[in-house]
Image (tube, rainbow, N blue to C red):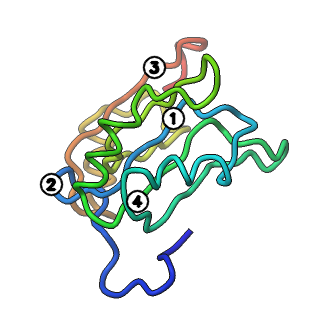
Amino acid sequence: GGPPPSWEGPAPGTGSEKVCCQVFVGKIPRDCFEDELVPILEECGRIYDFRLMVDPLTGLNRGYGFCTYSVKEEAQDAMKKLDNKEIRPGRRLGVCLSVANNRLFVGSIPKTKQKEEIMEEFGKVTSGLTDVIVYMSAEDKTRN
């Protein structure tokens, strides 16, 4: 990944829906790689960066990747043109805007801790915390 040759200026916007130039590309066949995907993605604009998620144990892709275009209009065009596009017989891509997921999973919190206590503790070491979601384990009701 990284900027294309001769790129000048700041990196395109990511994360925020207003400036986002990045799309999530899903439903990628596991044996499909950049040589097949990039030409399809380039149909919608100049690619700044493409990251295909690969399983290090198998060497196959994980079925998804992230494509950052040079401007948000190209990302929007990609969503329109490439979502549900058949890239192999019976195999269609899923393409949507990639917005930041600002969540952090924390395990092994004692079951006696309440949501308010957890927020207070994390508030001491971070800023901008807006919510805490406590999930009960489906398998073991004694664990959070």
Residue beneath disc 4: 68
- Amino acid type at mark 1: Gly
Q: Nearer the viewer, mark 4 or mark 3?
A: 4
- Amino acid type at mark 3: Met
**Marks 3 and 2 close (CB-CB < 8 Å):** no
Task: Please give the name of the residue rendered at 79% of the width and 50% of the height, measured from the top-left corner.
Answer: 56
**How many labels sit on residues?**
4
Residue beneath disc 1: 26
Label number found at residue 136: 3
Label number found at residue 18: 2
Q: Earlier in the sequence, mark 3 or mark 2?
A: 2
Binning the other alpha carbons within 10 Å of mark 4 as few (below 14), some (14 to 19) or many (20 upward) gives many
Q: What distance separates the C-alpha of mark 3 from that of mark 2? A: 35 Å
Q: Where in the figure is residue 118, as x and y percent of width and height?
A: 33, 43
- Classify 84 as above or below 6: above
Task: Please give the name of the residue rendered at 48% of the width and 40% of the height, measured from the top-left corner.
Answer: 25
- Amino acid type at mark 2: Lys
Q: Where in the figure is residue 113, as x and y percent of width and height?
A: 38, 34
Tell me: 143 left or right of 24: right
Residue 57 in which image quadrant: top right
Q: What distance separates the C-alpha of mark 1 from that of mark 4? A: 14 Å
Q: What distance separates the C-alpha of mark 4 from that of mark 3? A: 36 Å
Task: Please give the name of the residue rendered at 52% of the width and 19% of the height, measured from the top-left corner.
Answer: 137
Q: Where in the figure is residue 66, as x and y percent of width and height?
A: 48, 51
Secondary structure found at label 3: loop
